[in-house]
Image (cartoon, grey):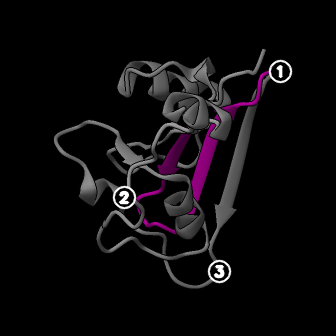
Amino acid sequence: MMGTTRRLAVYAYARPCDMRKSFDTLAALVTQGMGRDLLGGDVFLFVGRNRKRAKALFFDGTGLCLYAKRLEKGRFAAVWKRARREEPVALTLPELTLFFEGGEVLGRQTLSPVAAEAVPVFARARAAG
């Protein structure tokens, strides 16, 4: 039996965050402030007010992981500017990668068509014959 794959979701906190916060206080922001399941495997992004520091919190199946980065030059994107009300900002994994490299997403455009359901070649041949 083939297992199902799950798309990784990334959510950014909709306000600047105190970067002194660690596992427990960031976890509380995820569950109470964002209304999300911390243990679901998603990545949660937090950015400091001066945008020099950012943290990503996620559960890897065995425990919480906290990735932190401080920029020596420049600033991280102000992801909260994309927020509607106080809801978390949804990002794609490539956007998260771009964010941690110090870039900013200026606009979103679908680059690929919607994925079609894969049908084995022999099933199509059987249906045609």
Q: Amino acid at mark 3?
A: Glu
Q: Which residues are magenta?
A: 43-61
- Residue 79 - label: 2
Please name the residue shown 52% across and 83% down the image: 74
Q: Residues within 10 Å of mark 3 (few under 14, many from 20)?
A: few
Residue at the outermost front position: 129
Q: Using the image as rendered, state which of residue 108 and residue 128 is in the foreground.
A: 128
Residue at the outermost right position: 62
Residue 82 x, y percent position in the rendering:
26, 56
Residue at the disc numbered 3: 72
**Image height of 60 relative to 66, above or below:** above
Q: Number of marks in the image? A: 3
Please name the residue shown 25% across and 49% down the image: 83
Residue at the disc numbered 1: 62
User: In whole angstroms, how far apart are the C-alphas of marks 1 and 2?
Assistant: 29 Å
| Nearest-to-viewer mark from 3 and 1 | 1
Q: Secondary structure at mark 2?
A: helix
